[in-house]
Image (spheres, grey):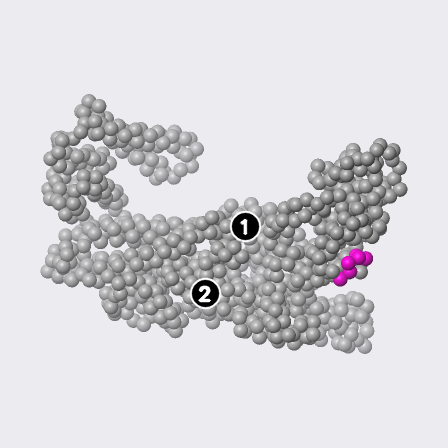
Amino acid sequence: MSISKTYLPKETEDKWYSYWLKHNFFKSVPDEREPYTIVIPPPNVTGVLHMGHMLNNTIQDVLVRRARMKGKNACWVPGTDHASIATEAKVVAMLKERGIAKKDLTRPEFLTYAWEWKEKYGGIILDQLKKLGASCDWDRTKFTMDEELSEAVIDTFIHLYKKGLIYRGVRMVNWDPQGKTAVSDEEVIRKEVNQKLYYIKYQVSSIKYQDQGADDQNSNDLILDTKYLTIATTRPETIMADAAICINPNDERYVHLHGKRVFIPLINREIPVILDDYVTMDFGTGCLKVTPAHDLNDYELGQKHHLPVIDILNDDGTLNEKAQILVGEDRFIARKKIAVLLEEAGALAKVEDYKSQIGFSERTDAVIEPKLSMQWFCKMGEMAKPALDYVLNGEVKLIPEKFVNTYRHWMENVRDWNISRQLWWGQQIPAWYLPNGEFVIAKSEDEALKEAQLKTHNLQLTTADLTQDPDVVDTWFSSWLWPISVFDGFKDPNNADINYYYPTNDLVTAPEILFFWVARMIMAGHEFRGQAPFKNVYLTGIVRDKLGRKMSKSLGNSPDPLDLIEQYGADGVRVGMLLCSPAGNDLMFDVSYCEQGRNFANKIWNAFKLIKGWEVDNSLANPNEIAIEWFDSRFNQALGEIEDNFAQYRLSEALMATYKLVWDDYCAWYLEMIKPAYQQPIDAVTYKATVAYFENILKILHPFMPFLTEELWHDELFGERDTLDCCIVAQLPNIGEINTQLLSEVEVVKIILTQIRNIRQTKQISPKEALELSVKSNSGINYQQYEAIIAKLGNISVFTAVNDKVSGAVNFLALTDEFFIPLNESIDPVVECARLNKERDYLLGFLKSVDAKLNNERFMANAKSEIVENERQKRADAEAKLKITEQNLADLAC
């Protein structure tokens, strides 16, 4: 093929992705190979690709492609989540644009519109993942409301209900007044907002006290006014729901109020003053208004003191008739109006600015209301214990391990799960209510009728007497079954797919859903399959900008991933994401990383162009045996580092090891060592080895950079390829022999060449001017075998061994060996003494740090033997260098 000046991603990405799809490279069916399985964390059907998706799916694709190249049967199951709250909000908005209100529709009519919306928009994010290169088995794409997946949800509900793990009751929940549904804790986003703190005066009823000039007291003295009790609140609109004022029994300021009652301002309803050490005396005024219907802690306090529960809010956040005033007003409008009414009534002592954390619905961005509601719950305690054990005994590994303690804390303090949502989009709860208020649980209406007749002993009951619960189950109640349900493991628990692919291998997800999704999947896996659903959980960090802020549309600091792919290519973006993404740690993303990824692609492209442009002369002898042998060992050494990093899920480090091997070792050193002179041919042996190395490099690069590698793989340079002979299924190379002595000696050669270049730069000597080089060897290295490399890359005309120092020459050290370059110029002893003293100081400091390690008992006890030996070698080398440096100082009489 003709080679363009630079790599052009647009010309390769669609071409090769279509090719992979056409030839079923992503497809997986059970066979005799070892399976490798990942199930995608299903993105919401309302979603579009964002930076978090980019990171998560790049990691998954790297793992899947690598497994495929290791000869495993790689299966990556894609799919989407129906996202009840978010999707219903989208559908309601769509209907509003058409002039249709949800309340005017029947449930079936609404669901028809919902499915219409899903078919139009629900697959957008999966199509976007294809642009990234995601090698999912698209024939296996699942949706959490597919018929068989929905059936699994209903069967699970019934199973857990029969076990006594699902129950119905009134509890305090997070209420979304815009979505008009309960939401889970993970769907509540805490934000710090500017508010007002209102100091409200409650008149004390029938109190006997000695007047000590209270009427003449400063009106700002809020706490000691004995006619009034003052509370501070950010929610004056809820005072009509107050059931008591609570004070600490040990608070001496309020001893006179023990057993008394106060009047709620504006409505003049009497409520008691109760005592409880729950109240913090030094916070606010030390008095707490107790509103059991609108605060979880207040509810628990109310239960303890047998207080009435007065709910003054409608489901949409407006005040109801129990509020007595401002009925029908929105809660926030009512807040402003009540503040005015309180001030007019002389009941508002003062108002202060105040900052606090407020919960917002992740799906609608409405402010969450704590609300008492009749809901369905799932008991978590019994299922949490085995799910915790899987992690603690290592059957499920959390990566990084720092999350184990977080997981343990959550699981040991688990609370029952509110699984019902007041929506229409989702799996409807399989509960049918009888006219007398009782209910039965059944999979269908006909089964429910039989259950109802049996329960009531009334065979005259008909389906007309039954009403199905209008709620749907929480979306997480379907996604916790995902690793089982995508393989149809509920309807057909012994089918070939579930038996082959389950348990899956790796799950890649975000730490914030470690409990809400990961832990629940482990619970479901144990409950329904008797084993955990995956072996490893790779927890990604949050993608932040270079200022450390979480990327979001509202901040405007999140680039569009598709725009990045357009500009830098999918491979460049993948490399950019992984260069800065250690597992479990947040990554500070900057577009410059994608630019670095694109530059890396161009470096590989240019190396290929260089090799492809060489003319081969079969009659030439091979002058590059050392270079070839060195790179062979270096490649195998790097391969070991890459394998080790992957084994420990250090993907960022694995990429960096690959990056250095390609950019530094292959391009900057090896190609320079073996490159023929300008317009001169290369020998066949070197050329064949160089092409073979490049082919292996393409293999180890492929999981990170699939498009570029596939494009180059099919070039005529590598010979003719069969249709299915593709890089995507090429087997990764195995680690071969490593000549450690050769590797260490070539590192010395690199030091020599670097020093020569530094001298040229310092002395302003042209690279074209040949230099003489002498070596006084103290290390025993045979430099004769490296003479050709040193001469070529250093432009050395004469390379000789000497037994003594060369006077009048610039000298430098490489390990313990001394090198001299005669420049026919006198050496300034003052400058040379300064340089040698600086070098001695460095070596003394280096020795001090090495000795500190070797004298550290903890280090010596825990470090691997090879690491300890490496430190000892460092010390020996430094001591030898120091001896030479001090001798040179002595010779100059410094």
Residue under the image location 25 percent in, 43 percent down: 747
Position in image of residue 691 (x %, y %): 23, 60
Quadrant location of residue 320? bottom right
Q: Residue at x 66, y 59 (%)?
A: 176
Residue 98 located left or right of residue 469: left
Q: Position of residue 134 (x, y in %)?
A: 43, 64
User: Does residue 341 show up?
Assistant: yes
Q: Which residue: 58% across, 53% down?
A: 515
Comparing 72 with 599, the one in front is: 599
Viewport quadrant of the C terminus: top left
For this view, does 560 lie left or right of residue 797?
A: right
**In the image, is residue 327 part of the stretch drawn in magenta?**
yes
User: Which circle, 2 or 1, is nearer the viewer?
Assistant: 2
From which residue to which does the magenta span run? Answer: 323-328
Image quadrant where residue 761 sits: top left
SS for callout 2: helix
Question: Going 47% across and 71% down the picture, which residue do you hit?
Answer: 139
Horizontally, is 334 left or right of 533 in the view?
right
Number of on-image labels: 2
Q: Nearer the viewer, residue 266 or 273?
A: 266
- Of mark 2 and mark 1, the one earlier in the sequence is 2
Give neighbour class at mark 1: few <14, some 14-19, many 20+ (Cα, 10 Å). Answer: many
For residue 539, say whether it is visible: no
* Circle on res. 319: none
The residue under label 1 is: 391
Q: Is residue 330 above or below residue 492?
A: above
Whether 519 is drawn above or below 447: the answer is above
Instruction: Tell me which secondary structure the magenta stretch mostly adopts.
Output: loop
